[in-house]
Amino acid sequence: MSHRRILHAADIHLDSPLQKLDAYEDAPVDEIREASRRALQNMTRVAIEEQVDLVVIAGDLYDGDWPDQNTGLFFVAQATRLIREGIHVAVIRGNHDAANKMTSNLPLPKNPDGSEILLSEKKVDQRILEDLGIAIHGRSYAKRAETGDMAGEYPQPIGGMFNLALLHTGLSGLEGHDPYAPCSPQQLADKGYDYWALGHIHQRGEHQIDGAAPVVFSGNVQGRHIRESGPKGCILVDIDDRNQTTRRFVPLDVVRFESFEADASDWSHTDELMDAYEDWLSEQLTQVDDRLLVTRVVLSGESSLHHQWMREQANLEAGLRAASVTHGHGQVWLERLKVRTTAERSKASAERSQAFAERPQSTVSSTDSPSDGPIQSILAVVEQLKTEGGDLDWMDEEISPLLKKLPVEFSGDQSLVRLDDQNERHEWIDAATAELMARLQGGER
């Protein structure tokens, strides 16, 4: 076969709900709400401009049940554009859209050869594209949590074809991800396919065994919150006449999330923070083209400004937000400021810590401490609370009664505290700890 080109995308999460960004009065809500749709439009445009032969979407096209049919109809319009250009489309459902009841009632356009776009959830489905010499293997999720070995069900490759497999999986042992359809790169390599197009992990990356077929996560097409930072998009896969591939990333996102993380230990004036942030913004703006840049500022380190920043945190955030608007010429929005600094220790305290560190190990008692006692004890309790997993029960007992008294609009995705999110629980604990330390070490507010 001559040259062929495939566009591999995944985790579009079409019309995914906002991640609390509309809780801020000046947030560019409309632009962010439309981001997933515009990213999908960009994918369609790239597929047509790059003259791809096949578009595959490896799960989580949708984020869940739709509030109405408009979400599904928007995808139908984009798929129809591709098919009219003679481009084949193959989609599997992932954990987010497996249970979408509306999908079964939505008529989808047929591929140029008359085949269905959506691959079956009952078994590993196949699409044979004779004119392209491509065989597609894939299976949709039948339920939200597919924890069995789906990869083991994939059949042997078809001889003489470029065998492409679609799978929505967390692989095995990838930290921070649910173990959906667990499998190992070696297991995928043993199948003898030519390319594994994976979805579910939102971070782009390759995990193949040396000498085996590419095992590729394309990542999601659009970041949805600050933890999904950096460029997001799709993978273009070029196939030569020997069924060997070359791959390149193409960004599709319209909103870019980035964090400015700074060690404030050497700063003695807030102006130094502002200058550093503006310099960082200038560098970021050269990389995002015309995208909206959503930023978060995270300050850490032992700082002489700690007490001042804790007392004036709202004013500091307002200053950074103003710098974002003016220096970013309306293209930058500050999502949040996090002050994670600690108070600068006195010279005597530092000398005690240094002396403790230099003592021979044999002379150190288990009751000895290099710290100032009570302060270090509080910090030790906080760390124990987080590392031993007691934070969920404690916060649920203390905070849930307060949350229930809030208006209904502050529930669900818009809850002020998501107790089911460990990162968010720890962020609240860290913020409260910093506030407590400022009060204890800084005297009157």
Image (cartoon, grey):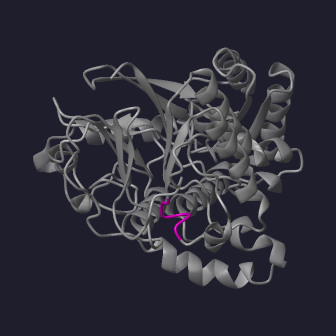
User: Which sits in the foreground, 20 or 111?
Assistant: 111
Magenta span of residues: 93-98
Magenta segment main secondary structure: loop
| Residue 337 seen from this side | no
Determine the residue positioned at 51% across, 44% down: 113
Question: Which is more toward the observer, 206 or 391?
Answer: 206
Drawn side of residue 89 relative to residue 246, left or right: right
Q: Is residue 95 magenta?
A: yes
Residue shown at 43% from the left, 74% from the top = 390
Left or right? Give the position of 362 relative to 254.
left
Whole-percent x, y for residue 327 in the image: 81, 20
| Place of residue 391 in the rendered image (x, y in percent of width and height, measured from the top left) | 49, 71
- Residue 284 magenta-drawn? no
Q: Is residue 292 above or below residue 288?
A: below
Q: Quadrant of residue 194?
A: top left
Quadrant location of the N terminus? top left
Up-down relation of residue 261 to residue 51 (above or below):
below
Q: Is residue 60 above or below residue 85?
A: below
Residue 330 in the figure: left or right of residue 439:
right
Q: Choose between 125 and 392: the one closer to the eye.
A: 125
The residue that appears at 81% across and 27% down in the rendered structure is 331
In this picture, is 315 found above or below 94? above
Residue displayed at 82% across by 41% down: 31
> Is 123 or 348 nearer to us in this picture?
123
